[in-house]
Image (cartoon, rainbow, N blue to C red):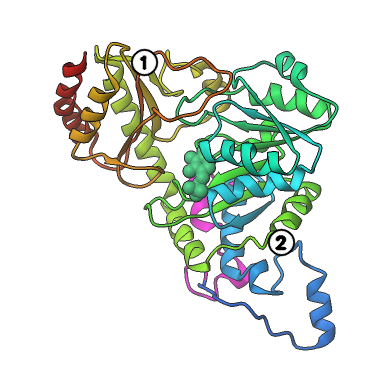
Amino acid sequence: MDKPPHRFDTRLSHAGRAGTHALGFVNPALVRGSTVLQPSCAARLEAGAQRLDQALIYGVLGTPTHFALEDVIAEIEGGSRCQIVSSGLAAVTTPLLAYLKSGDHALIPDSVYGPTRQFCDGMLRGLGIETTYYPPCIDADGLAALLRPNSRVLYLESPGSHTFEVQDVPALAAAAHARGLAVLMDNTWGIHAFQPFRHGVDVSIQALTKYVGGHSDVLLGGITTNDPAHWERVRTAAMALGQYASPDDCWLALRGVRTLGVRLRQQMQSGLTVARWFAERPEVLQVLHPALPGAPGHALWRRDFTGACSLFGVVFQPAIRAEALHAMIDALTLFGIGASWGGYESLALPSSTIARSVSPPLPGPAARFHIGLEDPADLIADLTTAFAHLRGGA
Ligand SMILES: *Cc1c(COP(=O)(O)O)cnc(C)c1O
């Protein structure tokens, strides 16, 4: 009889440490290298035929350090193989290029990460690939009505960037599969809490820059698949594009991953504590946190997710002017103002520049908050003081 699989924290402690990765030390070795010396010409030919495997052929195809991280990310995502690339954005663009060619059509959620939209509107359009932005909360029938004979990719991102709409992934994936599309999903927010392959996703995209790195000092992406055909597609595109990530960064991500479970649990709790505080304030119209009871998308979140991260949105009363919101954020002393998230430190960012094509605008000025590992009581005290600036514009 099979042993029951180990639980998440146990797997995080042990994944990626098997065999050649470990060399006897606790941690996988940091291997830097371009050339891999082969014992003979025949061995060189044999190695070259194993480009889809974890074979030591040439640095750009991976070192033991890359393969160790690949194993860990595949484990977290519940997939079989993972291609490590240089950034989260590269993990977005590589599979889009793998599945789309000139004349094809892709469906992209209107709530998509901004640089993904720019890639579609710029590079993909230049290559003769059409994109349709669809409302992220569309149902399967609505999606089917948008499909064209040349539709090849359904792209998902759930919850949406800045606006946190939760998508009905299983229903949308089934509708797309019925018409032969590949289903690609940016699963960065749902890391570990959403198991993409159990919900019909073919290719799962992770910005490892966020919680896996966890310390705001690494840029990395992971593209995970769960069957050989999708793996070949993704791996072939990554090789053709020369995708490569520094082994030093992979090594830092491997260090980050060992504490991912405890960090995520703590940050989810602290995030919910701060989100509940926002929800009680009269200056706040709506908190966009799928794990908060009563928030938009909560029912789907409860159905499909087993947890949450600590990134959420806050919509303020429409009477509050953007200048007052900016003054409030400027007055925060424990929240940095900047892009990215998933580190140990808290961040705040106005959502004023988000682009949308088919969704209604947010009903008031909004901001995105990332809750780090500080004590939430201190964060709430900081927010309480800074909120005085909201009155000026109200
Ligand atoms: C940050 C982010 C990315 C891109 O990651 P980088 O490593 O910064 O390029 C992709 N998708 C989402 C949802 C993100 O938040």
Region of the chain picked out in magenta, as a range: 1-28
Left-right relation of 231 to 245: right
Q: Quadrant of the C terminus?
A: top left
**In terms of secondary structure, where does tag 1 sit?**
loop
367, above or below 9, in the image: above
Residue corresponding to mark 2: 239
Residue 309: image location, x then y, percent = 43, 35
Q: Residue furthest bottom?
A: 40
Residue corresponding to mark 1: 364
Query: In front here: 305 or 154?
Result: 154
Earlier-in-chain disc, 2 versus 1:
2
Q: CA distance from mark 2 to mark 1?
A: 45 Å
Residue at position x 60%, y 70% from top? 64
Q: Is residue 115 visible?
A: yes
Residue at position x 53%, y 67% from top? 247
Examine the structure image and report whether residue 26 is included in the region drawn in magenta.
yes
Q: Amino acid at mark 1?
A: Gly
**In terms of secondary structure, where does tag 2 sit?**
helix
Query: In front here: 276 or 221?
Result: 221
User: Which secondary structure dominates the residues rendered in magenta?
Assistant: loop
Left-right relation of 286 to 33: left
Q: Amino acid at mark 2?
A: Met
281, above or below 70, in the image: above
Residue 321: image location, x then y, percent = 27, 18
